[in-house]
Image (tube, rainbow, N blue to C red):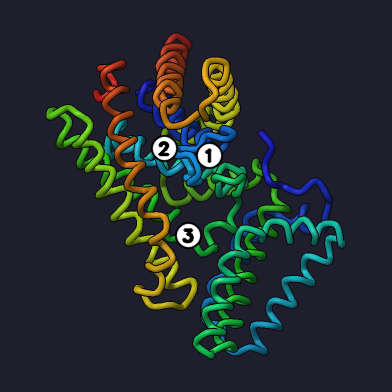
Amino acid sequence: MISLTSERRTPYHSWPAGPKLLGLSAFTLAIFYMNGIALSAAVMGAVIAAYLVGGLAFAREGLRFLRPVLVFVAIILVWHLAVGRVAEGVVIVLRLLAAIAAANLVTLTTRMEDMLDVIQRTLAKIGVPPATRRRFALSVALVVRFTPVLVQKGGLLVEAWRARTVKRPGWRLVLPFALLAIDDAEQTAEALKARGGVM
Amino acid sequence: MERNLTLIALFAALIAALGLVPKLTLMSGVPISAQSLGIMLCGTVLGAKRGALAVLLFLALVALGLPLLAGGRGGIGVFSGVTMGYLIGFPVAAFVTGLLAQTWRDRGGFVFPAVAALIGGVIVLNVLGIIGMSIKLDKTLLEASLLATPFVPGDILKCVLAGLITQGLLKARPGLAQA
């Protein structure tokens, strides 16, 4: 499965994942207490600059990631325009965009394996037993493997539906779809048991 | 042990797949994501503990950077976004739904799992989601709840579907409810 990590190499790609995540946490917390239009604009500017370090194409990729938020940005701006507190609205929007863009920057420049590593090490540090950690790792692998399988099987269900009716495929397909997932789970459990089981 | 683990993993994959399967509209005309239906099913089918774990596993993979949320979204950014209250609410919703569904399991039918999904997957989820939006957007709870209302009719429809699908699944695979 394709993760969201950017193909375009940036200097951030070689930074270790742990400190990146710590830095992001600190940044997100600080942003929450940020007030005033000048400060918000400066912080947003800094985030934009951080993206531009990776090149223009990389920054454009980051911009695309913000698209789902734009609806909320529009709603907030219109709302604050209507009640006449525009400056307040602009601060809220800048704060929101800066926090999301910074988090996206970490996602875009960190490989999934490295993230997983950080999680595993953190779990070990807070005293999660090794057996539980192994089960977590196995579960992650199973989801990564089975999501495309299920998507493909779901696609086949949709095709089978289309071959029989001109009506649009709808909720009726969810039942057989979930059954496929359940049967896959039962079979995988049997297979795991046959190979010595989960320790 | 193995069975619980694979059921949790496969339901996490099911939530993801429900958001990715192309053009599965729950009702013609109204775009409703099937993903939150998956959250409800985790509770009604797997019960409180396994259901909540499946949802947590799904969210962990989203945080790791896989584009598994409906519309191909993912990464840590979504947990900073406006809808982060809903994401935090997902496992809680599955847990509450599962708790109620387990309690009412013996009664059969589709009404009880549907009511469980309504309480957990709509009421609890929206309370947390609205609190999240009010924090993120610096709005009062009332103003934030206005943003959530357009989705409520679709959510209620999804509860009925979750009830019907759960009834069908438990009929087809009777051993499913046992841990």
To which chain does the residue with label 1 belong?
A: B
In the image, taking residue A76 as reference, residue B26 lies left or right, namely left
Nearer the N terminus, badge 3 or badge 2? 2
Q: Which of marks 3 and 1 is in front?
A: 1
Residue B179 visible in the shown view? no
> Looking at numbered disc 2 in the image, what kind of residue is underneath it?
Gly
* Quarter of the image where the N terminus of chain A is located: top right
Marks 3 and 2 close (CB-CB < 8 Å): no
Asked whether B57 or B154 is in front, the reply is: B154
Marks 1 and 2 close (CB-CB < 8 Å): yes
To which chain does the residue with label 3 belong?
A: B
Q: What is the CA distance from the residue labelled 3 to the residue labelled 2?
A: 18 Å
In the image, taking residue B76 as reference, residue B112 lies left or right, namely left
Q: Which of marks 3 and 2 is in front?
A: 2
> Looking at numbered disc 1 in the image, what kind of residue is underneath it?
Gly
Circle 1 Cα neighbour tier, 10 Å, few/some/many (<14 / 14–19 / ≥20): many
Residue behind mark 1:
B19
User: Which quadrant holds residue A21?
Assistant: bottom right
